[in-house]
Amino acid sequence: NGRCGTFVANGVTPVTVSNTSIAITDTIVISLNAVGGTVGAVPAIQTITASTGFTVAATALDTSTYNYAIIKNAA
């Protein structure tokens, strides 16, 4: 449960990413790792649950692999 990892979009519903390092005040940066399906806009964070993880939604038909990095809030 480091502050970075990968997830695969499923092109249909939000994907749950488990990471116990996350806090609701953190920022999550997403970048494309490997193209799959039809890539659209960069996936968007839908929810963050502290000490559990976050959900992210991609555009329809996008099954790409994405990198993510968690930036901790200094406060």
Image (cartoon, rainbow, N blue to C red):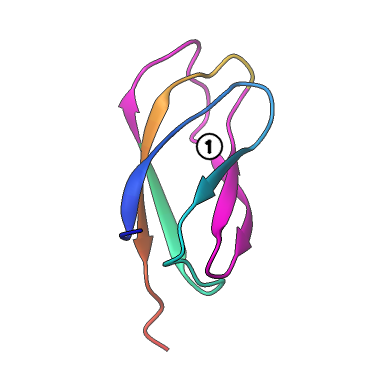
Q: Which residue is mark 1?
A: 43
Q: Is residue 41 left or right of residue 11?
A: left
- Residue 45 is inside the magenta segment: yes
The residue shown at (48%, 10%) is 37
Numbered disc 1: secondary structure: loop
52 or 45: which is nearer to us?
52
Queried whether the magenta region covers residue 48, the answer comes back as: yes
Q: On the picture, is 8 further left or further right than 10?
A: left
Q: Residue 73 location, x and y as percent?
A: 41, 78
In the rendered view, tell whether residue 59 sits above or below residue 75: above
Farthest residue to the bottom: give it.
Answer: 75
Q: In which quadrant of the rendered view does residue 2 lie?
A: bottom left
Q: Amino acid at mark 1?
A: Pro
Q: Which residues are magenta?
A: 32-59
Residue drawn at (37%, 60%) of the image: 70
Q: Tell me if mark 1 has few (under 14), some (14-19) or many (20+) residues whose alpha carbon lies within 10 angstroms of its own.
A: many
Task: Report x, y in % for residue 3.
Answer: 32, 60
Which image quarter holds the N terminus?
A: bottom left
Q: Residue 25, relative to residue 8: is it above or below?
A: below
Compared with 13, 19 (above or below) is: below
Picture layout, residue 47 above or below residue 57: below
Residue 50: give x, y in percent of width and height.
57, 70
